[in-house]
Image: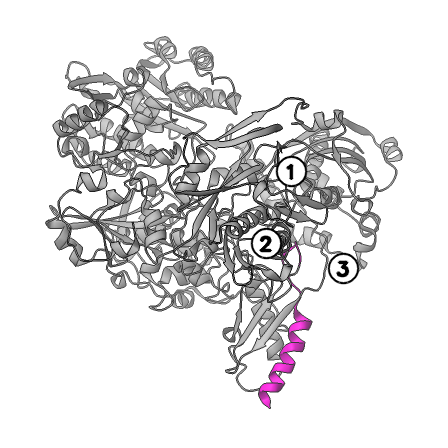
Amino acid sequence: MEESETIKAATCPNSLVLAVNGERFELPSVDPSTTLLEFLRSHTRFKSVKLGCGQGGCGACVVLLSKYDPDREQVENFPVNSCLVLLCSVNGCSITTSEGIGNSKDGFHPIHKRFAGFHASQCGFCTPGMCMSLFSALVNAEKKDRPEPPPGFSKLTVSEAEKAISGNLCRCTGYRPIADACKSFAADVDMEDLGINSFWKKGEIGEVKESRLPFYSPNNQNCIYPEYLKDEFKSAMPLDSRRYSWCCPSTVEELQGLLEINLAEKGKRTRLVVGNTGMGYYPELRQYDKYIDLRYIPQLSMVKRERTGIEIGAAVTISKAIISLREENKDKSCSEDNLVFLKIADHMEKIASESIRNSATVGGNLVMAQRNYFPSDIATILLAVGTTVSILTGLKYEKLTLEEFLERPPLDSRSVLLSVQIPHWKHVENGQSTETDSKLLFETYRAAPRPLGNALPYLNAAFLADVSPCKTGVVVNKVQLAFGAYGTKHAIRAGTVEEYLDGKTLSIVVLYEALKLVRATVVPEDGISHSDYRSSLAVSYVFEFFGPFINEGAVMSNGLLDRCNGSLLEEMPKVNNNGDHFDLTESPALLSSAKQVVISSREYHPVGEPISKSGAAIQASGEAVYVDDIPSPTNCLHGAFIYSTKPLAWVKDVKFKSKSLPNGVAAVISFRDIPKGGENVGSRTMFGFEPLFADDLTRCAGQPLAFVVADTQKHADMAADMAVVDYDSKDLEPPILTVEEAVERSSFYEVPPFLYPSHVGDFSEGMAEADHKILSSEIKLGSQYYFYMETQTAFAVPDEDNCMVVYSSIQCPEFAHTVIARCLGVPAHNVRVITRRVGGGFGGKAIRAMPVATACALAAHKLCRPVRIYVNRKTDMIMTGGRHPMKITYSVGFKSNGNITALHLDILINSGMFVDISPIMPLNIVGALKKYDWGALSFDIKVCKTNHSSKSAMRGPGEMQGSFIAEAVIEDVASMLSMEVDSVRNQNLHKFDSLNEFYESSAGDPLDYTLPSIWDKLAKSSRFAQRIEMIKKFNNSNRWRKKGISRVPVINEVTLRPTPGKVSILWDGSVVVEVGGIELGQGLWTKVKQVTAFALSSIQCDGTEDLLEKVRVVQADTLGLVQGDLLLGALHLNQVVKLLDFVAICWLKD
C-alpha cells in the first residue's frame, strides 16, 4: 500500500474510505491485518499516535473514532486503541488524533495548554493518548442531560475526568499533575485542590485562578466528522471481499455459508472479528487468509428486552451492554431484577479501559474464556445469575447454560456464539411471579492490582441469594456462588457450598462450615502466583456477603438489611439541579486531595520558577518528534532481533521454518557480518565491553544471535518469530541461574577497590552492647522491567565518505558513538549519533540502548541502505535485563529503646552474564543504607555472574534496594519491640557526629545537616502526631478496615561536576544552546533555558525581556558537542553560559 494510493477521489466502488483529522483517504487495497495504528504512522503525516505496548494496555495509541448512524442521523464518538482496531473495520469512519484538535500552527487546544501548564508531560510519549482520552470524555459529556456548566468548564465531573485516563499509562510524571489537568475542566472541581502550575501564583483567589486557565468552550470543537463523509456513507457498500479479503455478512445464513466455504477450503485460515481486542491478550503474528466481520448481522448486534429477561447479541460491545443494562433500571416494575442488571453493569465498568470496552464485545470475552481460558470477569458475574447462551454450529442451533458452555471442549472454527440471555429472576421458575417476603440479594467482587484500567483480577466473584426472615434469623432459600480468575481454566459455580447453604438459617456455625467448603473449592492450580491470597479472597468475599445477616439485631426493612453495610443493592446516583448551581452527587473522586507548597526566590530568576516544561505543548499535540517519528526514506529497511532462548548452549545454526526467506526479508546479520577491522561489540562501560551478537556460544537467554532485516517492521518481527535455532549443550557445564549457584562455583565479578565501600565501627562490639538481636534474617528482592513507554529504537542512515548517521533513543550517545565506530572498524569522526528526546528511559536507555543502535548501524553499513528498528515490547522485555535481583541476609543488634547498635549484611547481587554497571552496586547500596545510624555497619557484598540477561542501571540503581533494606531492618526491629516504626526511625536518625563517621568527607558542615529539622518540620506541617491519634481511633472502631501512616527519610549523596555546553547568539538576538545531556522528560532543556535566561539577564541591554522565549535548546549531536557522561540527570552550566553569553551580548552591543 503506497501513500500515493491513499489520497485520491472515490473512483473504485466498495473501497475503503475514512477521514483522518478531516483529510479524506481512500485505499483501493490493503492487507486486512493492518491496524489503524500502522496506517496512521506509516501512511499519514500524523505521528501523535504512538506504539507503546501494542496490546491496548498503555493508551499511547488512543484516538477518537467517530461513526455516523444514518438511521438516527447522529454521530457516535468514542475513544479506541488504534493498535488493536483493524483498518478495514473503520470504513466510513472519521479518526481524530491529538494534532487534529490543535497544534502549533493553528493554535493549541485548551487540553494541550493545560497539560503543559500543570506539568503533566515529562517524556511526552504518552501525552497525546492522554489528551485524546480526555477529549473524548469532554465530547461525550456535552451530550449528557445536565445543567450548563460555568464558562470555561465542561459538563464533565471530577470523577469522570479521573476515570477518563484510567486506560492510559504514564511512567514518568505520576498521575496527580495529569489528573489535575483533567479535573480542571470539570464543573465541580475544587480549584484549591489543583496542584502546582504555571497559570496562577500562590495566594490568588478562586475567581482569579479560573480566569487564568486557558479558556475552554465546547462550541469551538473542530468538526470531528466531516460532512462529505456523511454523504458518502449513505451510498456506501460493503468492502469488496476479493480486494480486501474482508467479508461482511448481513445475516446468519450468509455467515453459515462463509463458514462452510471456509471448511471446504482446507489449509486457509479465517478469523472472525468485531473489535479485534483479543489480539491484545493473545497476539498472533501468523497471517489469516480471510476476515469475517460480524458487526453487520442484526441478530448478533441487538439487545432485546423481554418479560423473561434481556438478550445481548454476541457482537454487542461491552460499553453498549453497560448502557443497555443501566437502561433496564429505569423500569421500576421489577426493581430487584433491574438492580441486578445495574450491579452487572457496574462491574463491567471495571473491566479493561473505556477505549477497550468500546471495541471489545460480550461474546468475544466469553469465547476467549471458553476457548483460551481467559480470566474473564463477564463469565463469572453472568454465571452467578443463571445466564444461558445461544450457539450456532454449522446448521445446528443450541441453547446451553453458561456453565455448560464453559465446560464443553473449545469451540471449533464452525461454531459461533450468537447471544447471551440474562434472566429476570422473578420469572425464572415456570414463568410465574410469586409474592413472598423473600428478598433477592446480589453482589459482585473483584480484586486486582488497580481498581480501574487494564488490570486482570487475582479473583472475581458474584453471589446471588434469595433470603427471607424467620424468627431465628435469616433463611437462605436459594444461593448461587460463582468464582473465577483465581488460577483455574474457567469460572465455576461452587455447587458444594450452594447445596450446603440452601434452606439453612444463617448462624456463625453455618457460615464457618460454608467458609471451609469455599476454601476447599477455590483451589488455584499449581504454579499460580499468590495462590494463598486468591483462596483467602474467596473466603473473605463469602464472609462479607453473608456476615451482616448474623449480626445480632439484623432485621429486614424495605428489602434491605439495616446493618448490611453496603452488601446489598443500593440506589443509583442522582443529579441535583439547584437553580444555576451545578451539583452532581456521583461517586467520589478516585484520588485523595493534596496540597503542594513550593517557595521560590527571585534572586536567580527565572531559575526555580515553575514554568511550563520546554516542549510540553508540542508533546501534548503530538508534534514532538521521537526517533520512530522520523520519516523513512523510500529504500529504508527494518530490523528485528533473533535472540537466544537458552541460558547456555552452542548455537549450531539459525534458520527459518520455511525453506525460503520469509516475506520481505532482505538479509540476516550476525557476528560473521562484522566488517574487517571491526569488533563484535554492542555496548561498553568503564568496566568493559559486551558483545553485539553471540558467537558460537550463547551465554544467556535473551542474548542477540542475529538481526533480521526486512521491508517493513511487521515483516521483520514475523521473520524473527519464525526463526528456528539449533542448540547443543554438549561438553557444557549446567548454567548458573541463581546467586546460590554462583557462590558454589565462585562466579563473581571483581569490584574495584575504590568502588567498594568501607565498614563503619566494630560490629562485634556493637552486638555486645545490644539488649536484643535478630540473627540471619533474609530478604529477597526480585528484578524489575523498565517499561519505558517508547521501546528501544534506532535509525541508521549511511552517509557520504563511509560515514554513518545514527538517530538513537539513548541516554548516553557518546558511548554509543564509540561502540558503533569500533564495531564498524571506522574512525570515530565517521560516526554521528543524534538524540533529540527519549520517550522514557529510567536507565534502560543507557547501556541497553547501545546494541540496538549498533545493530542498525552494522546492517546499514553492510547493505548500504537506511535501517531502522522499533523493538517490539516482548523482545524488549526479554533482552533488556532490568533491575538487579539480590538476596540479603542480615543480623542486627539493638537496645530496648529501639536504638540500633550493630548491623551486618551479606548481599548477593545477580548481575547477569555481562558486567554492565554492576560493580557500582555495592557503593550505591551502602550509600543508601547509611541514612540511619546503625552504630556499627559491616557487610560482605558479592556481585554474582550468572547466565541471565545483563542487569543494568534502573532508577536509583542500588539506592532503591539499599533504602528498602534499611526500612526492612527498621520495621523488623520495631515489630520485635512492639514499638511504633516511626519511633524507631526517629531514634536512629543521624546526629552530626554519626553522620560524619558514616559519610566522612561528604558530611559537610554541621549547619548544613538539616535532616532532623526537616523531619520535625514535616511532622508539624502534616499534623503527623494528630493523624496518628485519629488513625488509632479509627482502627479501634473498625474491625475489618484499618489505616496506617508513615514517613520515610531519604538521603542522596550529590556530586557536582562540570559538563560541556555551547551557546550561540544568532543575528536576531535569539539564542541556541547545546548541552552535554539528554532530554528524557526530566526537564533538562527547561532548566538550561532558565539558567541561560538568568545569565543573559545579568547583562543590561535592550531586548532582554522575555528571555526564556529567546532561548532554544537543541538536540544532542556527538559531532556537534562532546557529550557529558553516562549519568545524565542534570548539568551545571552556569559559569560556561555566563562567559559565552557575556561575550555574545557585548558583540551585539557593538
The residue tagged with tag 3: helix, strand or loop?
helix
Q: Residue 911 or 425: which is nearer the viewer?
A: 911
The residue that label 3 is drawn on is: 1008
Amino acid tagged 1: His
Determine if the magenta segment contains residue 1135.
Answer: yes
Q: Is residue 695 above or below residue 154?
A: above
Amino acid tagged 2: Gln
Q: Residue 954 or 592: which is nearer the viewer?
A: 954
> What residue occupies the far front of the structure in this picture?
676
Q: Is residue 943 above or below residue 145?
A: above
Image coordinates for residue 520, horizontal then vertical, percent:
46, 12
Q: Is residue 215 visible?
A: yes
Q: Earlier in the sequence, mark 1 or mark 3?
A: 1
Quadrant location of residue 267?
A: top left
In the image, the segment drawn in magenta is 1125-1150
Say whether residue 1125 is left or right of residue 358.
Answer: right
Q: Bin the neighbour count of mark 1 within 10 Å (Cα to Cα): few under 14, some 14-19, many 20 and up.
A: many
Give yes or no for contact between labels 3 and 2 (Cβ–Cβ under 8 Å). no
The residue that label 1 is drawn on is: 884
Amino acid tagged 3: Asp
Q: Which mark is residue 811?
A: 2
Q: Is residue 551 above or below residue 697?
A: above
Image coordinates for residue 461, horizontal then vertical, percent:
38, 24
